[in-house]
Amino acid sequence: MPTPVRIAVVGAGARGTNYARLAARGEGTVSAVAEPDPQRRRMFAEEFSLPDDAVFTTWEDLLAAPRISDAVVIATQDRAHSEPAIAFARAGYDILLEKPMAPTEAESELIVDAVEESRVIMAVGHVMRYSDYTRELKRILDAGTIGKIVSIEHLEPIGWWHFAHSYVRGNWRREASSSSMLMAKSSHDLDWLSYISGRAVTKVSSFGGLYWFRPENKPAAATDRCVTCPLQDTCAYSATKIYGGFLDDPAYQVWPLQVITPSPTKDSVRQALEDGPYGECVYNGQNDVADHQVVNLEFDDGSTASFTAVAFTQLDFRKTRIFGTAGSIEGDGQILSIFDFATGDTRVVDTMPTGGASAADGHGGADGRLVESFLRAVSTRDTTQVSSARESFGSHRLVWAAERSRELAEAVTV
């Protein structure tokens, strides 16, 4: 049996805790944590039975201590990624870095430079490319089953309550303090489209913006907080209705409930909605990121892809249609339906994902596959198990190009 990879976690929020649990269930062991919030730090240390000398308030304290980890998971907020990532890379730690790498191109390139100079392994949390669904789809495409890919349509149905939770009330509601919606939510998708197509993107165009979650759309009877609002039982975005409905479902304890309060109970959730950002009306004007966006890609062989991210859906798996010269594929994150032009036959492949599409369910098993691949890469030094830092940086550059296009209202050459 291989020796378990020792993992330190920087940022014991929902994502950091999820990655730690997945590592502990596989070929990893959680050896340390750095988390500034005392309650989250205590809960994490208790769950993973960490001794006092393995529990730190800051990542700087962890880095300065005698080394007790082989690798580090960095799951801090977006704008707090670059400093620890660069420092841990230079110190020789392998890194699992939650996406995005960093909100700016300059910071992200510094991370890549540090990783390459130190020759450490770094995987970015683009979990979509690691799922069983993606692996089967990629195998089918690479086998030439539908000929050459000519065009792709791809949809990300974010989910009305998920968008309200993360991008109106939550940590990613303002670009200046986090990143664009496209970077925070859909860097996954542009990475995925590049991966399955196997082609380099040459040109990008994008349109979209903040359509609905604006003060002018606030109902006349609405108050500033859901707990006092006369519309809380009927409003689609009611925080009391959304979070109250999750209390009895264990799948939602870590996400989203532990995001709004570390120990979710009926009383603690109510208190959080009375005092914190997750109880604010979605029409208060606290947010500025896009709630809908389209991105068009042109690849180096002339093929194209279109991508839509939209808040106003059920939270579900992505939907994709791929059009080739010899056939087509329709996929919904679970089932692949493959049509052959020559025979007129349709073949269906069920990839049987584990769990649902949300972070609460591990993104249909994709989170687990990412952690599994990262641990294998670290233990074997086989860098092909994960996408490289440079490759992930290339996917991020597509997001920045799309944002430039959206701002300039013109196509951008990559």
Image (cartoon, helix red, strand yellow):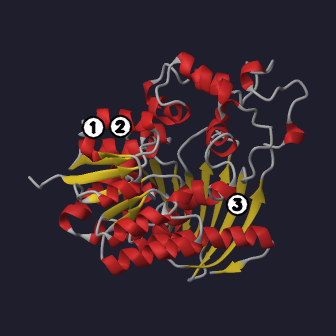
**Would residue 17 appear left or right of 159 to someone viewing this image?**
left
State the CA–CA distance, disc 3 to disc 1. 42 Å
Res 379 visible: yes
Q: Please state the horizontal and vertical placement of residue 235, each as a whole percent of the image.
A: 76, 26
State the CA–CA distance, disc 3 to disc 2. 39 Å
Say which amino acid is labelled 2: Phe
Label 3 belongs to which residue?
Answer: 294
Nearer-N-terminus badge (3/1): 1
Going 62% across and 43% down the picture, which residue do you hit?
166
Q: Is residue 207 above or below residue 364?
A: below
Q: In this figure, what is the number of numbered marks?
A: 3
Label 2 belongs to which residue?
Answer: 44
Q: Quadrant of residue 379?
A: bottom left
* SS at mark 3 in the image: strand
Say which amino acid is labelled 3: Val
Q: Quadrant of residue 373?
A: bottom left
Q: Is residue 92 above or below residue 224?
A: below
> Around disc 2, counting alpha carbons within 10 Å, would you say few (fewer than 14), some (14 to 19), or many (20 or more)?
many
Label 1 belongs to which residue?
Answer: 48
> Around disc 3, counting alpha carbons within 10 Å, would you say few (fewer than 14), some (14 to 19), or many (20 or more)?
some
Q: Please state the horizontal and vertical placement of residue 255, each as a whole percent of the image.
A: 49, 36
Report the disc number at residue 60.
Answer: none
- For the residues labelled 1 and 2, say whether their Cβ atoms are less than 8 Å apart: yes
Q: Mark 3, mark 1: which one is toward the viewer?
A: 1
**Would residue 90 appear left or right of 212 to someone viewing this image?**
left
Q: Residue furthest left?
A: 1
